[in-house]
Amino acid sequence: MTAEGHLLFSVATLVLAQKLNITPVLAQGDWFHMIPAVLLGSLLPDLDHPGSILGRLFRIISLPLSKLCGHRGFTHSLLAFCGLAILWETQITPRWDISADIFHALLLGYLSHLIADILTPSGVPLLWPLKARFTLPILNKKNNKKGERFISVLILIGALFIPPHLAISLPAQINNWLQMYHDKRV
């Protein structure tokens, strides 16, 4: 998927998550916090590609990461996703007072990137270091910008038609952890 596709998909996913009240923080979050965070989160997994937007900005990280793991390796896994959450909790939170909605949106953006790449024939190694790749190749052409835009618009339209009373919560343990983080930040 292209950078444009990831950015569009992440914003559509944020609108859907907010509409579905996935977490209380996202449901009540500040859009001026959440939009930049979800956009950044959606680009983070491609830090393993020196030609990506973040890869070009942070070559000192991107080049070694690319050589060690290759593109769509470690950074496209649930291990990296969990690592980001732990790194945020242990290194970022104690040093800076950053709103919980930024944290939730950043994680959602990262997750949206993984989901979007699952829609391509290459898929992603969610269980890295295991080699198994998860794929649902809806976007079967490389750089299929029309397809990427169509899926994002479809998600947005779907989100707009969701009844206001419909809510989907995360499993209790995840929601409790996120709520604990939110309570700690308030």
Image: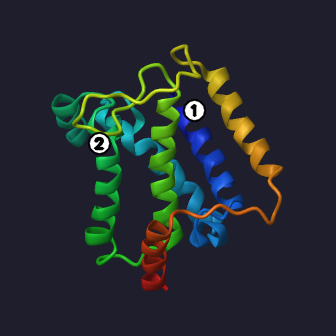
Above/below status of 129 relative to 38: above
Compared across the picture, whether 103 is left or right of 78 comes to right
* Quadrant in which residue 125 is drawn: top left
Q: Which residue is nearer to you in this view: 23 or 146?
A: 23
* Quadrant in which residue 47 is drawn: top left
Q: CA distance from mark 2 to mark 1?
A: 21 Å
- The residue lying furthest to the front in this view is 172
Tag 1 residue: 5
Compared across the picture, whether 20 is left or right of 45 comes to right
Q: Residue at x 67, y 32 (%)?
A: 151
Compared across the picture, whether 166 is left or right of 68 comes to right
| Tag 2 and tag 1, C-beta contact below 8 Å | no
Which kind of residue does numbered mark 2 sit on? Phe
Q: Position of residue 169 (x, y in %)?
A: 60, 64
Q: Is residue 99 visible?
A: no
For mark 1, give the secondary structure.
helix
- The residue lying furthest to the top in this view is 141
For mark 2, give the secondary structure.
loop
Q: Residue at x 80, y 66 (%)?
A: 165
Callout 1: 10 Å neighbours few (<14), some, many (20+)?
many
Above/below status of 52 relative to 103: above
Q: Position of residue 1 (x, y in %)?
A: 50, 27
Q: Residue at x 33, y 65 (%)?
A: 88
Please name the colour scheme applied to the rendered image. rainbow
Among the two numbered marks 2 and 1 on one chain, the one whose residue lies closer to the N terminus:
1
Compared across the picture, whether 63 is left or right of 176 comes to left
Q: Position of residue 7 (x, y in %)?
A: 56, 40
Tag 2 residue: 58
Above/below status of 127 relative to 86: above
Q: Position of residue 112 (x, y in %)?
A: 52, 44
Which kind of residue does numbered mark 1 sit on? Gly
Query: Which numbered tag is attached to residue 68?
Result: none
